[in-house]
C-alpha cells in the first residue's frame, strides 16, 4: 500500500516534469522559428531597399532599361560589380507592366526583352509598395536562406521600374539562429529552474507531509518508545479476535504485565535506564510470542499480551510463566545490572469475559491480585475477584464524584510537645465518605485516585481546606498537610500553596508540608527548586515517615528540612523488639538535634512509649495516645482542653496521662 502510494507520487512528479520539459522545448522551437524569420525579414528588407536605392542612384538609364533598351556600358559595368556585393546573388529589372527586361543569376547578366511576365512585379508597380518574401532554397541552385525582394524604383516621386533583388541570407540566418538559440536555451534553463525549484520544493513538502501523516497515524495506534501496539490497536485486535471466537472454537487470553518497582529504577538510575528497560522488555516479549499474538504497551510500565488460540487455562498459565521468565532475566545498562521482576495477571475469553473491556478488566484484576500477593508472581483471574472489581468501580465512582463536588473531608490529628504536653498543631488527614456513609481512609482510596490522575486536584483542595480551617484556630497552632509526589510531578505546587495562603490569609509559618522520601529519590532539580521556593515563602517542610522506604540519611542533608517525622512503625517496634527500635529512635532524635531539625514521633499509642520519649527527650509526639484524628468541628474541643490543661500547675502536668485522655 505504502509502496503503491510512493509510486503514484513519483509518477505524478515525473509526468509533471515531462509536461513542463516538453512545453519548454515546443515553446523554444516555435519562438526560435518566429523570431529568426522576423529578424531575417527585417534584415532582408533593409538589404533589398538599400540595394534598390543604390541601383536607382547609380543607373541613370534604369527607366530605359525597363522600357526594353540595352543598358549603357557604364550601367552594365555597375551591374556586373553590384551582383558581387551585399549578398545579392541575382536581380531582375522589370517594367511597370511586369515584363522582365534584364536578369542576373549572379554570374551573368542576360537581356530577356520582356519575354517573361512577372505578375508580382506588376502589382508592386501598381501599389508602389515593395513585396519581400524570405524563402528557403536548395543549394547549389539557391542559397539555403534567401530573400526575394520586389522594389519599385522611384525617381522624382514616380515609379519608373521594378527591381527584384535576390539576397543570400544564409549567414544571417545561421547567426540569428545560433544567437537566439543560446538566449533561448539560457531562458529555458532559467525558466526550467523557475519551474523545477518550486516543483521540487512542493514535492519535498508533500513527501514530508506524507511522512508526518504516516507518523501521526502510526502514533495513534502505537507506542512511541517501543513501537508496540498501544491500547487502541490492542482493543481493535481484541474486538476482531472476539468476532471470530465462535468460529475458531478456541479461547484467547489477555496477559496484563507490570514491571515491579519500575518507578524506583527510573528514579534512581534515570529515565534513560527506564526507557532502556522498557525497550528491552518489549523486545523480549516480542521474541517469546508468536506472530499471531499481539504485544502492546499501555503506557508506564504496563505491557499487555493478547495470546491467540489458547486451549485452556493451563496453557495460558504456561505462556504467562514464559513471559515472566523472559522479562526476569537481568538487563545490562551501562555498568548497571538491572534485575527487574514482574507481576502478571491473565484472563481467558470467553470463560472470564465476553468483550474486550471486560476481559482487560479481569486481567487487570488478576494483576492487582498478583501485586497484592507480594508481586513477582502470576495470577489467573478468578470469579471471586469480580467482587473486588465491582468494589473498585464503585470506589472510582465515589472518588470522581468527591472530586467534582469537593466531597472529601479533612480530619485533624493533634501534635504535642513532649516536654510540656503542649498542643502545637494538627495534621490534616483526608477522608472520603462512601455511599453507605462510612469514612474511607486515605490508604484505601489515594492510590486509586493516583491511578485516575486526580491526586493533584485532590491535593489542591486539601491545601485550601486545611489552610481555611487553620486560619480560624489560635495563632500559635500549625497545620500539617501531606503533599504527594504526584502533586510535585503535576507542577506548580509552590503557586498552589501561595494561592491557598493568600486566599485564606493563613500565615505561611503556620503551614507545614509533609513530603516523603520517595519525592527525593530521583535527582530531580525541579523538585528541589519547588522545595526551596516553598521554604523561601516561610512554609515549613517536613520529612514524613522517616525510617521507612529507602531510609537514606543523605536526604537529610540534601534539603534543610524543618522537621523529621519518625514513622509509626518504630513505636510498634518499640513494644515488639525493644532495644533496636529504641536505639534507632534515639539516634534519629539526636541526629535531628544536630541538624537543627525538630523530630516528631508518630504512632504513639501507649503510656510506655510516652515515658520512653520523655526519657530520650523527644521533641514532639503524635498518636492515638494523645489524640485520634477528629473532624474539623471537634478540633475546638481539643484546643479548649489543651487551653484548660495549660493553666494547670507544671507539677500537676507532669505525667498527667489521665488528663490528656480527656481530649481523646
Ligand atoms: P501519615 O502522613 O503518616 O499520617 C499518619 C497516619 O497515621 C494517619 O493515617 C493517622 O491516622 C495514623 N495514625 C496516627 N496516630 C496513630 C497511632 O497512634 N497508631 C496508628 N496505628 N496509626 C496512627 P491515615 O489518616 O489513614 O493516613 C495515612 C496516610 O495517608 C498518611 O500517613 C499520609 O501519608 C496519607 N494521607 C493522609 N491524608 C493525606 C492527604 O491529604 N494527602 C496526601 N497526599 N496523603 C494523605
Ligand atoms: Mg503525614
Ligand atoms: Mg507519617
Image (spheres, rainbow, N blue to C red):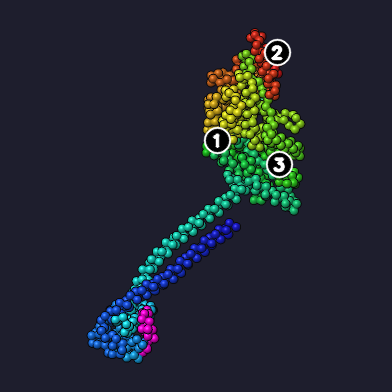
User: Which residue is identified by label 1?
Assistant: 269
User: Which residue is identified by label 3?
Assistant: 361
First of labels 2, 3 by sequence position: 3
User: Which residue is identified by label 2?
Assistant: 658
Closest to the camera, between mark 3 and mark 1, is 3
Element under label 3?
helix
Identify which residue is drawn at 64% across, 17% down.
Answer: 423
Q: Give x and y (percent) for residue 568.
A: 65, 23
The quarter holding residue 378 reads top right
375 displayed left or right of 265: right
Q: Is residue 128 visible?
A: yes
Q: Quadrant of the C terminus?
A: top right
Q: CA distance from mark 3 to mark 1?
A: 32 Å
Element under label 2?
helix
First of labels 1, 2 by sequence position: 1
The quarter holding residue 513 reads top right
Element under label 1?
helix
Identify which residue is drawn at 30% across, 77% down.
Answer: 50
Q: Is residue 18 magenta?
A: no
Closest to the camera, between mark 2 and mark 3, is 2
Magenta span: 116-132
Among all residues in the image, which is located at the extreme left? 74
Q: CA distance from mark 1 to mark 2?
A: 52 Å
Amino acid at each position: 500500500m505504502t509502496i503503491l502510494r510512493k509510486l503514484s507520487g513519483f509518477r505524478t512528479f515525473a509526468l509533471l516534469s515531462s509536461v513542463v520539459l516538453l512545453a519548454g522545448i515546443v515553446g523554444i522551437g516555435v519562438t526560435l522559428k518566429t523570431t529568426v524569420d522576423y529578424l531575417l525579414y527585417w534584415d532582408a528588407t533593409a538589404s533589398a531597399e538599400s540595394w534598390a536605392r543604390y541601383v536607382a542612384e547609380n543607373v541613370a538609364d534604369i527607366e530605359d532599361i525597363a522600357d526594353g533598351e540595352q543598358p549603357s556600358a557604364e550601367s552594365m559595368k555597375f551591374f556586373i560589380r553590384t551582383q558581387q556585393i551585399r549578398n545579392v546573388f541575382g536581380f531582375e529589372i522589370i517594367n511597370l507592366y511586369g515584363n522582365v527586361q534584364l536578369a542576373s543569376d549572379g554570374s551573368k547578366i542576360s537581356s530577356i526583352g520582356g519575354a517573361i511576365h512577372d505578375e508580382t512585379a506588376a502589382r508592386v508597380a501598381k501599389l508602389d509598395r515593395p513585396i519581400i518574401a524570405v524563402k528557403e532554397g536548395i543549394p547549389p541552385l539557391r542559397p539555403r536562406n534567401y530573400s526575394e525582394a520586389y522594389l519599385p524604383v522611384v525617381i522624382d516621386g514616380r515609379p519608373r521600374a521594378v527591381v527584384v533583388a535576390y539576397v543570400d541570407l544564409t549567414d544571417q540566418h545561421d547567426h540569428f539562429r545560433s544567437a537566439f538559440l543560446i538566449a533561448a536555451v539560457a531562458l529555458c534553463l532559467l525558466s526550467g529552474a523557475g519551474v523545477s525549484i518550486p516543483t521540487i520544493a512542493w514535492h519535498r513538502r508533500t513527501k514530508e507531509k506524507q511522512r508526518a501523516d504516516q507518523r501521526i497515524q502510526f502514533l495513534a495506534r502505537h507506542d512511541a518508545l517501543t513501537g508496540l501496539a498501544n491500547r487502541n490497536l490492542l482493543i481493535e485486535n481484541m474486538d476482531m479476535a472476539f468476532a471470530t471466537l465462535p468460529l475458531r472454537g478456541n479461547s484467547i487470553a489477555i496477559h496484563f504485565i507490570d514491571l515491579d518497582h519500575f518507578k524506583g529504577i527510573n528514579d534512581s538510575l534515570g529515565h534513560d535506564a527506564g526507557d532502556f528497560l522498557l525497550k528491552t522488555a518489549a523486545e523480549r516479549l516480542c521474541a517469546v510470542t508468536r506472530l499471531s499474538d499481539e504485544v502492546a504497551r499501555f503506557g508506564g510500565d504496563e505491557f499487555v499480551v493478547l495470546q491467540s488460540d489458547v486451549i485452556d487455562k493451563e496453557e495460558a498459565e504456561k505462556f504467562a510463566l514464559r513471559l515472566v521468565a523472559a522479562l526476569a532475566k537481568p538487563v545490562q545498562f551501562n555498568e548497571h545490572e538491572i534485575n527487574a521482576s514482574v507481576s502478571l495477571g491473565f484472563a481467558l475469553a470467553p470463560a472470564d469475559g465476553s468483550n474486550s473491556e471486560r476481559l482487560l478488566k479481569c486481567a487487570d484484576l488478576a494483576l492487582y491480585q498478583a501485586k497484592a500477593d507480594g508481586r513477582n508472581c502470576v495470577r489467573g483471574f478468578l470469579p471471586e475477584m469480580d467482587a473486588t472489581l465491582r468494589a473498585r468501580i464503585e470506589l472510582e465512582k465515589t472518588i470522581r464524584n468527591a472530586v467534582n463536588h469537593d466531597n472529601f473531608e479533612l480530619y485533624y490529628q493533634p501534635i504535642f510537645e513532649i516536654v510540656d504536653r503542649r498542643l502545637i498543631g494538627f495534621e490534616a488527614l483526608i477522608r472520603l465518605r462512601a455511599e453507605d456513609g462510612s469514612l474511607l481512609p486515605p490508604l484505601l482510596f489515594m492510590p486509586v485516585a493516583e491511578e485516575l490522575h486526580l491526586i493533584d486536584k485532590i491535593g489542591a483542595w486539601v491545601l485550601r481546606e486545611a489552610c481555611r480551617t487553620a486560619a480560624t484556630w489560635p495563632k500559635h497552632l500549625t497545620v500539617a498537610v501531606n503533599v504527594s509526589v504526584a502533586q510535585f510531578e503535576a507542577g506548580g505546587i509552590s503557586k498552589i500553596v501561595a494561592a491557598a495562603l493568600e486566599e485564606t490569609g493563613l500565615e505561611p509559618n503556620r503551614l507545614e508540608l509533609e513530603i516523603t522520601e520517595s519525592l527525593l529519590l530521583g535527582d530531580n532539580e525541579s523538585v528541589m527548586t519547588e522545595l526551596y521556593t516553598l521554604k523561601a515563602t516561610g512554609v515549613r517542610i517536613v520529612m514524613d515517615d522517616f525510617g521507612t522506604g529507602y531510609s537514606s540519611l543523605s536526604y537529610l542533608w540534601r534539603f534543610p528540612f524543618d522537621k523529621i517525622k519518625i514513622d509509626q512503625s518504630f513505636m510498634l517496634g518499640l513494644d515488639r523488639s525493644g532495644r533496636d527500635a529504641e536505639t534507632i529512635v534515639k539516634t534519629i532524635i539526636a541526629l535531628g538535634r544536630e541538624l537543627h531539625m525538630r523530630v516528631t514521633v508518630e504512632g504513639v499509642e501507649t503510656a510506655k512509649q510516652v515515658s520512653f520519649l520523655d526519657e530520650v527527650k523527644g521533641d514532639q509526639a503524635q498518636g492515638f495516645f494523645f489524640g485520634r484524628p477528629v473532624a474539623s468541628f471537634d478540633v475546638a474541643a481539643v484546643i479548649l482542653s489543651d487551653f484548660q490543661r495549660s493553666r494547670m500547675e507544671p507539677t500537676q502536668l507532669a505525667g498527667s496521662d489521665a488528663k490528656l485522655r480527656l481530649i481523646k
